[in-house]
Every structure is written in structure tokens, then in C-alpha cells.
Amino acid sequence: MGLHRRLLFAVLTVSCVLIVYILALTLERPLVPLYDLIQRASGVSSEEPLHGPSNDAHLTFLPPVPSSHPDRDVGNLYLMHHKVQKPLLANETSKSRSDDANNKTRIDTKRPTVKPAQPAKPTDPSFIGDSYMSADVPPQTGCPDSIRSRVGKTEFGARFLESIPVLQWARHVTPEQHWRLSHYPGAHGWGGIDYNTLVETLSVLNSPANWQMLDNWKAAGNKSECSRCAVVGNGGILKNSQKGKEIDSHHYVFRTNGAIIKGFEEDVGSRTTHYTFSTNTLMNSMLSYAGDGYRGPPVSKETRYVFLPDHDRDYLLMKAVATHTLVDRGREKGKNPVKYFGEDVSAEKLKMYHPDFIRYLRNRFLRSTTLKSKFKNIYRPSTGATMLLAALHTCDQVSAYGFMTPDYKKYSDHYYDKNYHPVGFYANHDLRMEMNLWQQLHKAGLIRLYMHN
């Protein structure tokens, strides 16, 4: 009788499970496998937890790539985190491949020995995106001794892209480019900026002057075959340097952020042809250095304003500057750009770095270990570094002044500091890496870096 009761109980249990399962199907409720239900009812535990980690938990699935996507040939961008199987050899069976995957060498006297598959090399994470738009921007000079003609013979030859667009303008805004660049946040792409805002703001950059850094080279009637650019940082090394006349003697003079000129002309010069900034660094400079005499960007007939687009704030301010209207929305809503750039500024005087260029500088010249830390999303080349490397890509000859050198502790943070202030280091820039890069470029003969003897 005991055996009959146990069999009857088992039959009833399975019947109940089947009824519950049929009801669940009828109600379209999420199901667990029938086999697991039976195991649970019979008190048998599964070898794996029902909702435990699967073998695919480490995979990151990215959006499908359109066939026309510019990054379509960059395999590591879309295969990241996936194991790449090596191709099956003509004389290799599928079993030998399986053995290889288990790091075992298959030895067969009838076939050549197949080496174990090597672990796949680490691939770049998705936010790197080392693939860029190509722009056909012919050189503006016929300089026989330009940086472009020499860079291939240096250690930087493999990194340097002559066709990288340094500046963006109206014709760069297309749905395809927006889709591509929306994957990269901050200064490295158009992530978080909707397409309509880009069209609305970048449409004002619609003249050749907007995509040529040295837009007035021919009009200026320069007799020299080579364009010479002075790139001036704000480092304390310039204090009492007496380099002002030398700086002003260049065809073009680049400055950035809190560039205070009045009262320091003998050391830093007086001209500014290109002023690089982001809306954030501009506003912060006006707050932080007001006591030292900084009132805003340099204003002159020859000054061009080069925006570094860190947020949508930069696009909105740039549009307001070009149209002589108040900023219509965002953090600077209601502000009058005339206050910063003067009455005479025109759209032809405005330029904006291309996000591909910023990402390219980060990936190929300033690939900091910060990219492996929790600060990777805010890291970018400093505004001064972007300015200097932009000159490297657009000028024939570049001299750099006021940039950090290995003896930086001898000098205050800025040349206009009334008292000594040590250089500050922050997570969003790698200033030591930038300092080492300037030394390498100087040693390679690509820039002439001002250093104290």
C-alpha cells in the first residue's frame, strides 16, 4: 500500500504541474522551463541557479552598423568584448579548432601540427572610436619645409592624419554623420546634441573662412612661402621672458582662455589672431582671473574665435555671436555675446573644432591612462593642448611659448600671478602627459618649444 500511495502522489504532483503550466500558457505569463518546474516539485535542485549569470553576460551588444556607416571597416569597434575565432585552415578540421579553443594542441601524424589559438588582443572600448571623417583641405602655402613634409620621417608619422578635418562647418551636418558622432559624448562627438540643434547652429558657419584656420593667408599678401605660427600658453615660464616682440613677429598668434595681455606685452606680445576657448573655460576664466585683469577674449580686427565644443552651450553661444542675437536657451540664456566679442564680430571670424579632431588628438597623441579610470568620460586634451596641436596640423612652422616644461615647479601657474601658485592638476586633463608630448615634438623638430636655459 505504501508503494501505491507514493506512486499516486507522484502522479498527482506531475498532473498539478501540467495543469499550472497549461493555465500559464493560456494567460500568456512568463514561463520557466517545464523541466525546472518538475525538478522543483520533486525537490531536485538544478546544477545552475535559474537566473544565474549566463555565458554571454560579458558581451556588450552595440547597435547594428549601416552599410554606409563611415566606421563600417573598423572591426574592433563592433567586435569588442567578443572572442574572435581564427579562420579555419584548409587542412584543419572543426574538431582541431575546438581543441585550439581549449588551449590544447592537436597532434596528428597525418596533418601538420596546429598551434593553439592565441588569446585575442584587447580591443578598444566603444568610446575610443579611432576612425574619422576625411576632408580634402589642400595646403594654403607651397612651403618646402612644412611640418606636413617632415612629419613622416619622425616617430609621429604613423599617428599623423593629413586629411583629418580640424574644423567643422555647415556641410558636415548630415543625418549619417549625426548618427555616427552621437556615439561619442562631450568634445569627442555629438552625443546628447539633437540633430535640429546642430543644423540650426552650424548653418551659420557656411563660408570658406569657417573651415580654413588660416583663412586670410592669401589676402594678407604674405611674401613668405611658409606660414609661421606662435602658440602662446599662459604658463608662468613667460614671466620676464622678454619674448613679446618675437611672438608678435609671427604671421599668426594663437592664445587661449585667461590670456591677459595688457601690462604684459613685453613678455607675451600684443597680437591675437586666433583665440581658442570653450564656453565653460571662457566663463570660468572671467570669474577666476578678473582680479588679475582678465575681462574677456581679445578683441581686434584680425582676431578669429575658435570654439572648442564641450557641450551644447558652445553651439548656442556660437550661433548668438554669428547672428548678433541673445543666447536663446541653455545656461547662457539671455546673455549678449557683444559683451565678450565686440560689435564688429562676424560669422566669418568664427570657427569650431571638429569633434573627430578632438577625439583623434585624444586617441593618437594623448592616450592617457585616465581613459581606464572612472574619469574616462570627462577626460579630454586641455584647451591649450588642442590649440597647439591644431596649429601643428594647419601651420607650416610652429613655435610654442608658455607651455609646461619639466622644470615647471620653478614657475607660477600663470605669468600674471602676483604671488606664486603651483600648477594645478585635475582629472579631466593629463598635463604631465602633455608636457612630455611637447618635449617629444620639440626633439623631433616639429615645434620649437620655449624653455629657460
Image (tube, rainbow, N blue to C red):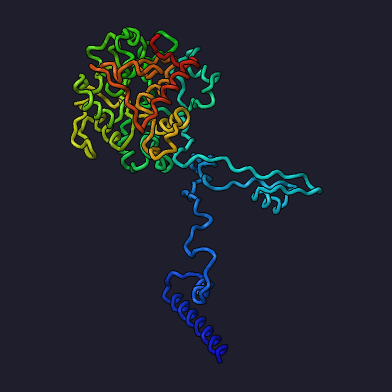
From the viewer's perspective, is 59 left or right of 246? right
Residue 387 in the image: state x and y as whole percent. 37, 23
Q: Is residue 278 visible?
A: yes
Residue furthest to the front in view is 2
Quarter of the image for the N terminus: give it: bottom right
Name the residue located 47 percent from the left edge and 78 percent from the top edge: 22
Q: Position of residue 167 (x, y in %)?
A: 39, 28
Q: Is residue 209 above or below residue 110?
A: above
Q: Nearer the viewer, residue 50 or 159?
A: 50
Which percent across, then down, holds residue 386? 38, 26
Residue under the image location 48 percent in, 29 percent down: 364
Q: Position of residue 4 (x, y in %)?
A: 56, 90
Vertical position of residue 212 compared to residue 201: above or below: above
Q: Is residue 268 visible?
A: no
Residue sitting at 49 percent across and 65 percent down?
A: 50
Residue situated in front as seen by the camera: 387 or 16: 16
Name the side, left or right, on which 33 lies relative to 109.
Answer: left
Q: How many marks?
A: 0
| Res 307 quadrant in image | top left
Q: Residue pushed farthest right?
A: 110
Q: Residue at x 36, y 33 (%)?
A: 427
> In the rendered view, does 74 fall on the left or right side of 421?
right
In the rendered image, the quadrant that contains the C terminus is: top left
